[in-house]
Image (spheres, rainbow, N blue to C red):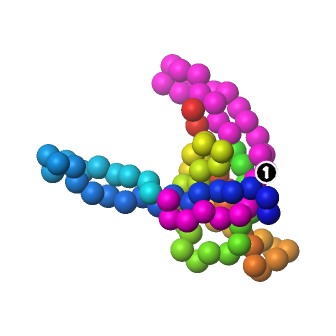
Amino acid sequence: MNDRVELLKRTAGRDGAGQPVESWPVLREVWANVKFQSGAEVMRANADVSIVKCSIRVRVARDVDASMRARYKGTVYDIQAVLADSNDRDFMFLVCESAK
């Protein structure tokens, strides 16, 4: 575990005009192992988009779920799934994706 990753949790609120806004404050910072699985460039809405997929191995945390995000070296990744590590009950994998 030699990578620092921030786990972000969405919060909803209202701005000064009463309009709904969402923010992604840091829930906590954790040590992790980040492995990049693939990258691709695709067309979405007539624009080139780069998609990067990674797996982030962290210690088990019951409050982490697929509605959250992870930030690693300034890039924000949507957590797609939270999977148990079949080799070690103390760890889990965050399957993540980032599109730019």
Q: Give the camera-side residue of 18 and 86.
A: 18
Please state the extent of the stretch shown in magenta in the rendering: 26-52
Q: Is residue 66 left or right of residue 33?
A: left
Does dot 1 land on a helix, a strand or a loop?
strand
Badge 1 is on which residue? 35
Q: Is residue 79 visible?
A: no
The mark tally for this picture is 1
Q: Is residue 33 above or below residue 61?
A: above
Residue at point 68%, 39% (across, down): 52
Query: How far from the left and from the top, in percent, is residue 78?
Result: 56, 50
Q: Is residue 97 left or right of residue 55?
A: left
Give the quarter of the figure containing the C terminus. top right
Query: How far from the left and from the top, in percent, is residue 59?
Result: 71, 72
Q: Is residue 91 above or below residue 40?
A: below
Q: Considering the whole magenta stretch, tell me its main secondary structure.
A: strand
Q: Is residue 49 above or below residue 1?
A: above
Considering every residue shown, the one lying at the far top of the view is 46
Query: How far from the left and from the top, in percent, is residue 1?
Result: 79, 63
